[in-house]
Image: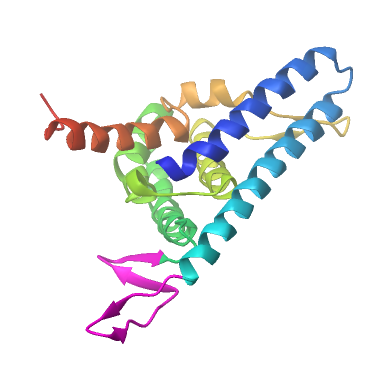
Amino acid sequence: HQKLSGPIRVAKLFTKVATVFAAESVSLYGNEVNTHTHRNFAEKRHRHFQQKRQQMAREVSFNVNGEKIDKVSKFKYLGRILEETDDDDHAANRQLTRARARWGRIAKILTIDGASPRVMGYFYKAIIQTVLLYGSESWTLTIGMIGRLRSFHHRVARYITGRHIKELEDGTYFCPSMKEVLKAAGMETIEVYMDRRRNTVLKYAATGAVYG
């Protein structure tokens, strides 16, 4: 999506800068603060340009046979809410809510039946992820919304593998590597799955065929 390219490039650029700073930093906490600051800047920049586009759009009017067409801030099309804000956080939040509810029911059944992490991972990808990412091929999301999708994806992986964040006796916390947790569950990052769905659509648009 063209609308996502700017903020994503900025976020990636700042991530590279933060990596360089990390090599010179002596404080892990300081590294996390720097990364968080860069992400906030990217999101604020995205909102700024988004507001400018919205203001320009509001100043445009359309007429049919001399009569001005009324404007609405949002409307439903094929079951999906389209908003004037030109982002799809509302649609993504709706799918996230549905995925959480469905996973809550399926996870109980799989746990009672003693399903292995890999099997539970298959069910998640085949059933829950289909709900979670429905329509994501054309989503325009804020960095915050992508973070919420990623958070749910990670929580599912931790549940599947049983590798949760735990408080130790000395008051510190043990946080298993998310890369290892995903691998144990037979899963990849949520960004990988979103990119695959988008690439499938792009391939169809370019060649007229998804397979073959």
Q: Quadrant of the N terminus?
A: top left
Residue 203, position as x, y percentages in the image: 22, 31
Magenta extent? 60-82
- Rendered residue at 14%/30% (across/down): 207
Observer-nearest residue: 69 or 116? 69
Q: Quadrant of the C terminus?
A: top left
Q: Is residue 86 magenta?
A: no
The total of numbered circles placed on residues is: 0
**Outermost residue to the top:** 23
Observer-nearest residue: 49 or 200? 49
Residue 64, position as x, y percentages in the image: 24, 80
Using residue 19 as the reference point, say whether residue 63 is left or right of it.
Answer: left
Identify the image's colour scheme: rainbow, by chain, secondary structure or one colour.
rainbow
Observer-nearest residue: 160 or 60? 60
Using residue 102 as the reference point, say whether residue 163 is left or right of it.
Answer: right
Using residue 205 as the reference point, say whether residue 24 is left or right of it.
Answer: right
- Rendered residue at 33%/81% (across/down): 69
Question: Quadrant location of residue 198?
Answer: top left
Q: Against 58, is 200 above or below?
A: above
Residue 47, position as x, y percentages in the image: 61, 53
Residue 190, position as x, y percentages in the image: 46, 35
Q: Judge whether residue 18 can be spotted in this image.
A: yes
Q: Judge whether residue 159 can be spotted in this image.
A: no
Using residue 77 as the reference point, say whether residue 187 is left or right of it.
Answer: right
Question: Quadrant location of residue 55?
Answer: bottom right
